[in-house]
Image (cartoon, rainbow, N blue to C red):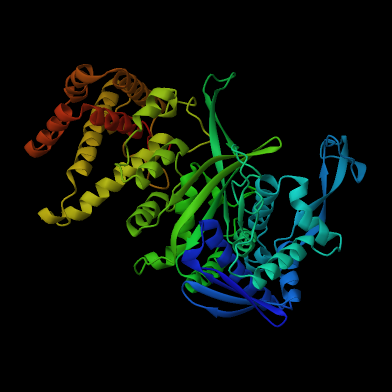
Amino acid sequence: MSRIWQEGNYLVLEYYLYDLPTVQHKAGLAGLLLLIDTMSQEGEEPVPEVLKLDTVYAMIRFSKESFHNMFQYLYAAAIEERKVKQKRQGSQPHRTYKEVNAEGKLEKWFVYRDLKPLGKFFQFHYPAGEGKWLKLWQDMLWSVIRSSPKSRTPFEEINNGKDLSLAKKTWASLLKKSKRPDVSLLEDISGSIFIGAQAQNSELVGFQGEVLENLLLHFWQVIVMVYVPRDIKITKNKVTGGLDAERTEIGYVLALPEPSDLEWFCKEYEDFLRRLPTDKNNHYRPQRVLIDIPAEAGLEFIYRLTSSKLERGFSGCISSVEIFHLERRGNNVKVHAAESILPDEGTLNAYQRLMDGKELNPLYKVYRIRNLLNKNPWHQGMDALFYHYDWRLFVKYREETPQRIPFFGLSVWKEFDATRKALDNIKGDGKMDKDKALPPEDQLELLIYEVVQRYIWLKTDEKSPVKYEKFKDNKDEKGKVIYPKEYCEAREKICRDAFLAVRVRKSQAFLDYFTGTICSVPQYLPSKDFQLVSQALINDWEKVKTLTLLAISANSYLKGGQ
């Protein structure tokens, strides 16, 4: 258990990692150690002393001066001037001015002086010149952790040159505890240092903790990684009649690591911060933090932290990552989700293959990540999307399919293509080893895709006034076939009709359509493959239907030069 004692004018604190009650406490201990190390590197004297540190144990000695200096460093703040076009309700601007804009019109600006957390720790460790990561942390802190004016008191006191009352109070509590170390000393815990804490719960019970452990809760903010989940809203364009897709941010997802090895984690985390990518895009958020499902934050964090280890075998310095999806609504902060993500090498490798160098459709990615974490087939549950959304999201149809998000069918095609390449690698020189054969599940997916593909290609060639043989050698500078407009329109109609016909049919009606329509064109299947498809139709027609819809979507995307 945690202990405290006095050595002259010093307080010595002792922590055992696995005795701490929550992940937030454990993350706080790692954050405290990292903060002390960073202060030492920056020469921020006086600095607390780490007397002993190993895998699960830390002993730290504080003087009153070093304790106060540590809190001054943690809660450093400054005033920043911000100009806005609209006057803030209930707040007087510091000054106003007018200027001529690019269109030659006179605009009025309101200038406010806003307090902002400096985040000295992050300024030291983030890549040089990269301000997006720091701003993200600052925005998160003010929006969902310290959204109320009262919770910002430590920052205001430091900015105003006052003694930090929080440091005084905490030191006094620790001093009191050191005089009677065997007696429990409980104090209230606020939501600004413990996510989800309330002054009183619905049973009017206060939220309290041991003062020695409460100290750690100030420091998890040092190692929290912040992500931005986005929602997707599909609307109808009143001018074109097609679909538009809008992305909106819905709060923040906080990823808190649970260290399993204090020494190793601290070294890895400093390196992790230095390796954060510096974006050159115009978006005000780092590209890596934009996510489509809260659980993605946990996977992304674990993968980035351990990516260098995956190449030579995974052995993590963390036990799990806790994620919290928080959103500010008015004066309240809502906790949408809280869950724990457990790292394992197989899941991380699969996540790497899914995300590496690819921009995925957000609806597709949500299901892929859910299935990845639940160890389900990649396509499980995707049929729900086809019933819920307009078909033009899944079938590339002229300009009516949303242009602002990656096309769903392209993301699906990449998965089918990856399965095909895996099969080609296994076949090698044509002598396929039975021990290396694709699992029946993967073989079925590829067979359904190829059956649907052949139907769409042959039917398109039948309906199009311009035949494929006539233009197949007409390619652009990248070697891609340039498809005539008439051919594209014929293919769109074939895919649309097939998608809608399959979507509406169930059970025997679907089986009749699959065998009577999709298989009405010549399908050259070896007896073994024919048997696999036949058994799937009999035993699991719903899976075959989902794969059929996915295959139609993938084949509606022409990967050509036009």
The quarter holding residue 526 reads: top left
Question: Which residue is at a point 61% across and 65% down the rendered structure image?
Answer: 212
- Outermost residue on the left side: it is 527
Residue 94 vs residue 255, the one in the foreground: 255
Answer with left or right where residue 250 lies relative to residue 82: left
Placement of the C terminus among the 4 image quadrants: top left
Question: Which residue is at a point 36% across and 39% down the rendered structure image?
Answer: 412
Q: Position of residue 99 (x, y in %)?
A: 89, 41
- Outermost residue on the bottom side: it is 8
**Considering only vertical position in the picture, is 13 above or below 281?**
below
Residue 516 vs residue 220, the one in the foreground: 220
Residue 28 vs residue 116, the one in the foreground: 28
Give the tally of numbered discs: 0
Question: Is residue 432 something one can see in this rendering?
Answer: no
**Considering only vertical position in the picture, is 366 above or below 222?**
above
Question: Is residue 514 something one can see in this rendering?
Answer: yes
The quarter holding residue 328 reads: top right
**Considering only vertical position in the picture, is 445 above or below 29?**
above
Answer with left or right where residue 262 lies relative to residue 141: left
Answer with left or right where residue 258 lies relative to residue 107: left
**Considering only vertical position in the picture, is 424 above or below 378?**
below
Q: Position of residue 259 (x, y in %)?
A: 48, 64
Q: Position of residue 202 (x, y in %)?
A: 60, 37
Q: Position of residue 107 (x, y in %)?
A: 87, 36
